[in-house]
């Protein structure tokens, strides 16, 4: 029961961060005279926002199931797979943001009113720090976790790859809302118009893919170990060494 409510709390934090970022983008678009529809389309295409929305839906479904089915039985396979499938991308997101994107200068942010600045800080920290840290806690300690087969690793990797293809295609045909360029990529390391060109983009993507596979393997491995231990406790058997 406790973990169901913790997941609901995490979902509330996630959606509050998304809403805060939404308000920030609407305010900045108005102050800069930018196309609001384009700004919001870009915002909703961010990996951070899409991933958080998927997580919120997943956690609400998982929590409702847990509250309706009290006991010690493991969560349904679909729920376990969905949680693993979004945990990997969000952990990668936390690593990438804090390693590559934190502290990058933003001219428009410097002119934010105090209230918008506060919302921006909350959106940034809630989505890139609080949620990834909670997912680590959930992975290691949440009750009723189910072990998954190793092929689940493909599910963990699939969504970021689909998003990457979408973003690279869209980035080349969507203009920057500021009017500075005829293209718009959400993150500088994905922009082939930068100094390193496509080789730099491919290197970044390759490294991140390797990291994601490693994260995914850890998620599946930890889940399988915890699933075996839970099953052993329920049956009163000892886990083989």
Image (cartoon, grey):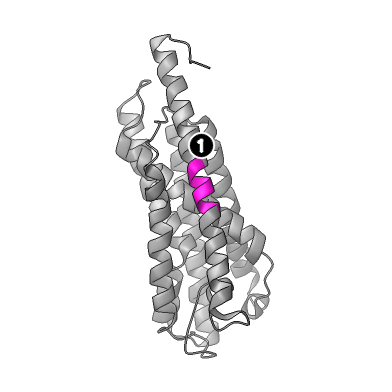
Image quadrant where residue 80 sits: top left
* Numbered marks: total: 1
Instruction: Please tell me which residue lies in front, 165 or 110.
Output: 165
Residue at position x 40%, y 77% in the image: 170
Residue at position x 51%, y 62% in the image: 20
Residue at position x 43%, y 41% in the image: 8
Residue 143 seen from this side? no
The stretch drawn in magenta includes residue 214: yes
The residue lying furthest to the top in this view is: 236
Rendering coords of residue 7 (x, y %)? 45, 39
Q: Please give left or right for residue 3 compared with residue 124 in the image.
A: left
Which residues are drawn in magenta?
211-217
Q: Please give left or right for residue 68 compared with residue 122 in the image.
A: left
Q: Main secondary structure of the magenta part?
A: helix
The N terminus lies in quadrant: top left
Rendering coords of residue 34 (x, y %)? 48, 86
Classed neighbour count for the residue bearing mark 1: other residues with Cα under 10 Å, few (<14), some (14–19), many (≥20): some
Rendering coords of residue 40 (x, y %)? 42, 74
| Relative to 191, residue 214 above or below | above
The stretch drawn in magenta includes residue 233: no
The residue identified by callout 1 is 138
| Relative to 202, residue 54 above or below | above
Residue 201 seen from this side? yes
Rendering coords of residue 92 (x, y %)? 54, 54
Instruction: Please tell me which residue lies in front, 194 or 121.
Output: 194
Tag 1 secondary structure: helix
| Relative to 225, residue 100 above or below | below
Residue at position x 49%, y 61% in the image: 48
């Amino acid at each position: 029961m406790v973990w169901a409510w913790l997941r609901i709390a995490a979902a509330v934090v996630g959606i509050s961060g998304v809403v805060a970022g939404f308000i920030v983008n609407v305010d900045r678009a108005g102050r800069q005279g930018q196309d609001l529809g384009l700004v919001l389309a870009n915002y909703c295409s961010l990996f951070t926002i899409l991933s958080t929305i998927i997580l919120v839906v997943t956690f609400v479904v998982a929590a409702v199931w847990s509250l309706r089915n009290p006991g010690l039985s493991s969560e349904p396979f679909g729920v376990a797979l969905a949680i693993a499938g979004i945990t990997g991308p969000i952990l990668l997101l936390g690593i990438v943001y804090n390693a590559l994107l934190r502290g990058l200068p933003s001219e428009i942010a410097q002119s934010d009113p105090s209230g918008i600045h506060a919302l921006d800080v909350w959106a940034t920290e809630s989505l890139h720090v609080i949620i990834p840290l909670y997912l680590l806690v959930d992975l290691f300690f949440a009750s009723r976790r189910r072990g998954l087969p190793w092929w689940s690793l493909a599910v963990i990797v699939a969504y970021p790859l689909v998003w990457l293809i979408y973003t690279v295609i869209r980035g080349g045909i969507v203009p920057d809302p500021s009017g500075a360029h005829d293209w718009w990529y959400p993150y500088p390391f994905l922009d082939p118009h930068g100094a390193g060109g496509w080789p730099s983009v491919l290197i970044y993507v390759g490294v991140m893919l390797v990291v994601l596979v490693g994260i995914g393997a850890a998620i599946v491995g930890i889940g399988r170990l915890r699933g075996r231990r839970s099953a052993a406790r329920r049956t009163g058997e000892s886990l083989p060494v």
